Image (tube, rainbow, N blue to C red):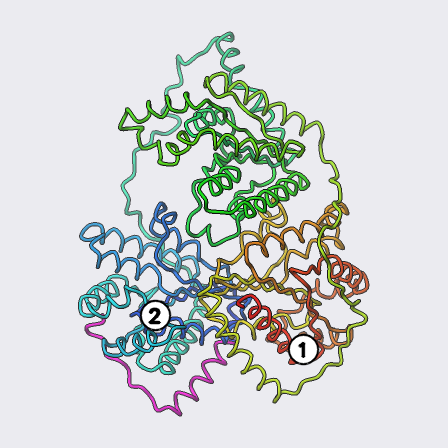
Amino acid sequence: MLTTWTPAHMPEKEEIKIRLQTARSQLYDFQMKIKEHKIPVIVLFEGWGSSGKGSTIGKVIKNIDPRFFKVATMSAPTAEELRYPFLYRYFKQIPEAGKFTFLDSGWMEQTCKDCLSGEIEGEGYTQRIDSIRRFERQLTDNGYLMLKFFMQIDRDEQKRREKLLLDHKDTRWRVSDFDKWQNEHYKKCAKIFSQYLSDTNASSAPWYIIDASDRKWAELQVLETMVSNIEVAMQNQAHSVPILQNVFPLEQIPRLSDIDLRDKTMDDEEYRGELKQLQSKLGELHNKLYRRRIPVIITYEGWDAAGKGSVLGKVIKDLDPRFFDVRTMDKPSEEELRRPFLYKYFAQLPEAGKFMFLEGGWMDELNSQLLHGKISEDEYERGIRSVECFERQLADNGYLLVKFFFHITKKEQRRRMDRLLEDKNTSWRVSDKDKWQNKNYDKCCRQFDYFMQRFEDSRSPWNIIDAKHHKWAQLELMSVLLEKLDESLEAGVQEAAIPENRFRLRSMPMLSEVELNQDMDVMEYRKQLAKCQKKLAKLHNELYRKKVPVIIAYEGWDAAGKGGNIKRIAGALDPRGYDVHPIASPEPHEKSRHYLWRFWTRLPKTGHIAIFDRTWYGRVMVERLEGFCSQNDWQRAYNEINEFERELKDWGAVIIKFWVQIDKETQLARFKDRENTPEKRWKITDEDWRNREKWDQYEDAVNEMLHRTSTDFAPWYILESNNKYYARIKALKIVIREIEKALE
């Protein structure tokens, strides 16, 4: 396609300016209609390095409410992602109905790179293309609007842009080795790109080649194409897609009536004997726990080669496979290392009523890091304190945690390792870590002892298993596990103790004391906005380079202006480096886990920013007042939230929390404005009016929240928002100040 493509005639600058204004306005209007019609939109940007994919995305999203889109930069797949099917990581990026996902590069770039490196060719390439065609067709058949843009520039222009980036220390990092290689082998790359575009150019998901030689002209082409396709998508929403004929060979299956069931008998004695074996105590308890909705976490730690995996295999034989998961917690991946220490363990929390078996875990990770000199003693102790909070919170929130340590002697470990090494089919199971552990057995033993002793008085103490003999280990473990499960069922739901606050708090005013008569005219606002956004954009670049994560949390009254506030902050940021998370009522799978789970799993990577439109503080506001949790739950939550934020701060995150304050009269005026404005009507709901009736109750809850969770490491900032201009600028200045402090 590239070889035959002819760029459209570029209009004059003035015409481009006028058309851009129109297209931007149309996209904003259509975004509301997309939400209303519940059409999910995927916008894929591919193209040459330095062709302006990121900057074009940045311009496009300025015309969309940041709560209804996300931007994902699909860099090279991680080692973890390479262990999944090719399309796995792209399926994960599919947006919800009514939202946009913008992909900065995707399956085209990955496929073309694999072609250029020789990793796929011939039949492998054909299979890859077939997979992509099916993927895109299934998306469009299921109501997704798919827009695919290829940003085209010539070799000289690419070279010029790369030089501009390389000449500045703040942008040098944006030019990768592949970008340089691409320019050196421009013709070879163009041939591969052209072939791919032709092979994947379908009527339901066509390619749009964008002349990216001029940035404003490129933006206009993208915007007008998006507007045109969104309009068509809404018109065609009700149309059915054709039913495709099966193309896969099918196995001949007999009808049930054809199966011979004669002479397949079993006498009563034989039946009772087998039934008794199958109806094990563990299976019975598993069913009871599922019905009582008690989540269970069983960790298997211990010496390498101690037989953890083989014993686990025996245990799960009697369990219903629908209601348990097994996870081997390997060495943290690159992606996990860019998150807080407990992130991957929170992510594995089971739903209520289910079992989670963890082979390896936080004990192994912390001790390994200390023993290999990757963390200091102070960092190790901080990690233990984090684990103590984590385990206590699990127990307080109804989880049963059972921890096993498999113990063998140094001699026995060596013998088992030698046996594994003798066979080529098992030798791979012995790692360098295993060998190091055996060589430093005594040192490791002391460290394991110290760690386990720190939890002797906890509600989840360690259970040491003599693992010298596999059968004995299995029986011992099963006995302990059944005992713990029985105890949990007998104890039932018990209220946890409310821990004393151990965090230093900042003084906060009562909401009734906040002066709301702050003012700012539109001219001053525009002047300050441009200045602040320019400064924040520069800081965002530095945050990325220094790998500092930022979390910005918004709470406030309905119609207080959270969305507009977020939009002005997001407007200054590189779209590839932040996510906006609009938090609604929890989904069923979220309700059945620890209430902080859905926030842990949304934390940003190092160098990225996460903006939360409503937060974990729902526990002590909405859930408290609407009766969605018990009094003990929300009273305990103040400390749990402070611990959560302390964990984030220790990780290195900048935490900025805003309460957006307005008075009751201003809220009423804004409610009525929304009702009377068609394009804003979706923003006002019956729930908003119900919440307004409870204004005084909410105000009391908010005051308590502010006073009990405004810590010295994560203080609250009140935004006086009767004047939205003032509130937006104040928020921007606070964000800038806090980031600057973190970068000092």
How crowded pointer 2 is (Cα within 10 Å; few <14, some 14-19, many 20+) is rated as many
| Residue 581 higher or lower than 573, as above or below | above
| Residue 12 located within the stretch drawn in magenta | yes
Q: Which residue is mark 1?
A: 676
Q: Which residues are magenta?
A: 1-28
For disc 1, the neighbor class at 10 Å (few under 14, some 14 to 19, many from 20) is few
* The quarter of the displayed image where residue 157 is located: bottom left
x%, y% of residue 77?
A: 35, 54
Amino acid type at image mark 2: Phe
In the picture, the disc for residue 149 is: 2
Q: Vertically, is 33 above or below 606?
A: below
Q: Earlier in the sequence, mark 2 or mark 1?
A: 2
Measuring from the top left, give residue 667's x and y in whole percent: 73, 73
Look at the image and tell me whether residue 32 can be seen. Answer: no
- Report the front residue among 3 and 547: 547
**Which residue type does callout 1 highlight?**
Asn
Question: In the rendered image, which quarter contains the N terminus?
Answer: bottom left
Who is closer to the viewer here, 738 or 13? 738
* Residue 706 quadrant: bottom right
Say if 702 sits above or below 493 in the image.
Answer: below
**Secondary element at image label 2:** strand
- Horizontal side of residue 356 vs 713, given as left or right: left
Where residue 525 appears, as percent x and y from the top left, is 61, 84
**The magenta stretch spans residue 164:** no
Locate the C terminus by quadrant. Answer: bottom right
Q: Position of residue 622 (x, y in %)?
A: 71, 57
- Quadrant for residue 532, please give it: bottom right
